[in-house]
Amino acid sequence: MNILLTGGSGLIGSELIEKLIDNGHQVRILTREKNVEHPFYHWNKNKIDEKAFEDLDGIIHLAGAAIAKRWTESYKKEILESRVNTANLLYKYAEKYVPNLKFFISASGSGYYGQITSEHIFEENDKAGTDFIGQVCVDWENAAYQFHKLGSRVICLRTSLVLAKNGEGFKLLKKPIQFGVGANLGDGKQWMPWIHIDDLVQMYCDAATNNQWNGSYNASSPEMINHATFNKTLAKKMNKPFFLPNIPSFIMKIALGEMSDLVLKGSRISPAKIEKQGFRFKYPALEKALKELL
């Protein structure tokens, strides 16, 4: 198939490109850069090279500003617009040049349900959160679902923390433990949904090729652990001590502002729906994932 990909230079996109090519697909990259290894087409906030849509089968939309950056009002606007406006632009061109587009796959976030800590295990039919990230995810997915008007399958992967060797998130988790100064953030009881990058990339490939995939799915490992257990397991695998007292929540709030909710809160996310679709996790448990990553 001919697949158009946004966000190809990111952590997930760079891995996904190689996987799709290995599976025999032709991948086109939408980029603002000039030097890209794979076939590419330029785009900006208002325009896309229409040649990118010739004989196109599907679109995978990963582009979006990083959320791990202090949330000023202007940056919060950028987080939203970089996801929603780009999806709207893609729809505008697809409607004109590919009215029979087979599928549109969009990244989304497990923050869809809101940044809270509770004992509830969230499934795809649960209500969205009313906080900033929850509402971003709602608007993000709504922008994707307009592709239903073209008769396209639409898949939104509500992605949890992605564990990858070169991922900035994983590097940040490892660094303090590596130097013997690891500590839990807040009370450490916040749930910490995660997924190995190999499993996430496979989900995108399956979503593109399996016509049974349609709708939103939780992209999260079946093992549900909290922040303290995650750190303890990581320290054990790294053969490092982990004994320092927790870092109080108020310190994280001073340091990170509103964004501190990303590390101080978290709930359990169920992948049951995606497993019922036939997906089998390569790394269903943290210990196995860490053994490969370390």
Image: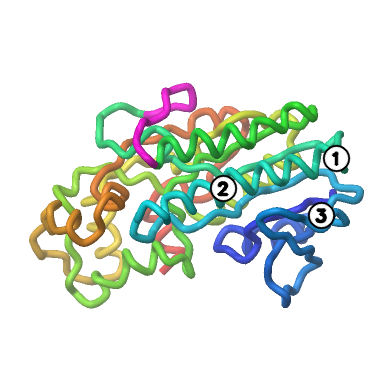
Farthest residue toward the left? 245
Characterize the local packing of mark 3: few (<14), some (14-19) or many (20 or more) Cα atoms within 10 angstroms: some
Characterize the magenta stretch by its predominant secondary structure.
loop
Farthest residue toward the right? 55
State the image quarter where residue 148 is shown.
Answer: top right
Colour treatment of the image: rainbow
Say whether marks 3 and 1 touch (CB < 8 Å): no
Between circles 3 and 1, the one closer to the viewer is 1
State the image coordinates of residue 44 (x, y, percent, origin top left): 69, 59
- Residue at the spot of label 3: 25
- Residue at the spot of label 2: 83
Q: Which of marks 3 and 2 is nearer the N terminus?
A: 3
- Residue at the spot of label 1: 96
Characterize the local packing of mark 1: few (<14), some (14-19) or many (20 or more) Cα atoms within 10 angstroms: few
State the image coordinates of residue 9 (x, y, percent, origin top left): 62, 66
Q: Distance between the residues labelled 1 and 2?
A: 21 Å
| 247 vs 270, nearest the viewer | 247
Magenta stretch holds residue 130:
yes
Q: What element carries label 2?
A: helix
Magenta stretch holds residue 48:
no
Residue 5 drawn above or below residue 236: above
The kind of residue on which mark 2 rests is Arg
- Tell me which segment is drawn in magenta: 122-132
The kind of residue on which mark 1 rests is Lys
- In the displayed structure, does residue 122 sit left or right of residue 184? right
Q: Is mark 3 on a helix, strand or loop?
A: loop
Between circles 3 and 2, the one closer to the viewer is 2
